[in-house]
Image: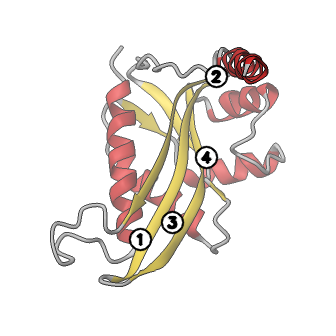
Amino acid sequence: MRRNLLIGLAFLMLLTGCASHMVARKGKAAELRQSSRVAILPFENLSGKEQVATKLTEYFYVLMADEKKFTLVESGSIFEILRMHRIRSSSLLTDSQIDSLASTLNVDYLITGAVLEFDEYDDNFLGKVPRVSFNTKVIDCQTHSTVWASVSHGSGDNAELLFGIGAIRSAEQLAEKMVMDVTGTISGLFTK
């Protein structure tokens, strides 16, 4: 009995020792400078589906193109600059790569991310249901730090009310709706 108590206490101490390193903190909302120049880098494709990162990047451009709080750099020049600096991964940028992009593109912030999922699964009642996941981050070129980040995950049946009413049937529609939510949040950060 005493031996079991000692083992239990040792296990509890081990758990509390490990738990002290696992802390979740709520991030402070970033306030970004208005009238800044922003570049949307091509999203990485980790989904295994062809061209979905290109689609998602285009959704970001289309939805942010008319934003009045900041100026968006044209996508054509970004691809050329990435090639020029031999930057292959827009998600894993080094400080020197951020400096190179910032000076060449004359930007204050970079928006980048990766598509994690872009597929469909079978549902007994709805049939094929789209599923999309992606992450997004905003990098401050001056400090090289990520000032805002999010992970978005959605399924076509999230908005279903009853018997399939309100369900989204295509991954493209779902992705566009999710990007609209993210771009609205990013635009709201430009308050300074």
Instruction: Mark 4 vs mark 2: give the one in front.
Output: 2
Report the front residue among 29 and 129: 129
Determine the CA span between mark 1 and mark 2: 36 Å
Measured as percent of width and height from the top left, residue 168 is found at 29, 71
Say which label, 1 or 2, has the lower sequence index. 2
Mark 1–mark 4 contact, CB under 8 Å?
Answer: no
Task: Look at label 3 and name its amino acid.
Answer: Lys
Query: Does any portion of residue 180 appear in the rendered image?
Result: yes
Q: Which residue is mark 3?
A: 55
Mark 3–mark 2 contact, CB under 8 Å?
Answer: no
Mark 3–mark 1 contact, CB under 8 Å?
Answer: yes
Determine the CA span between mark 4 and mark 2: 32 Å
Report the front residue among 45 and 38: 45
Does residue 162 lie above or below 123 as drawn?
above
Say which label, 3 or 4, has the lower sequence index. 4
Determine the CA span between mark 3 and mark 2: 36 Å
Mark 4–mark 2 contact, CB under 8 Å?
Answer: no
Q: Identify the residue at horizontal 53%, vertical 42% (top origin).
A: 136
19 sits to left or right of 111? right
Query: Does any portion of residue 65 appear in the rendered image?
Result: no
Judged from the image, the secondary structure of the residue bearing numbered disc 3 is: helix
Report the front residue among 11 and 60: 11
Q: Which mark is residue 172?
A: 1
Measured as percent of width and height from the top left, residue 131 is found at 46, 67
Task: Look at label 2 and name its amino acid.
Answer: Met
Q: Identify the residue at horizontal 74%, vertical 24% (top origin).
A: 4
Q: Within 10 Å of the Cα at label 4, are there few (<14), some (14-19), or many (20+) other Cα atoms?
A: many
Q: Identify the residue at horizontal 67%, vertical 70% (top origin).
A: 48
Q: Within 10 Å of the Cα at label 3, are there few (<14), some (14-19), or many (20+) other Cα atoms?
A: some
Measured as percent of width and height from the top left, residue 191 is found at 33, 19
Q: Which residue is mark 4?
A: 41
Quarter occupied by the N terminus? top right
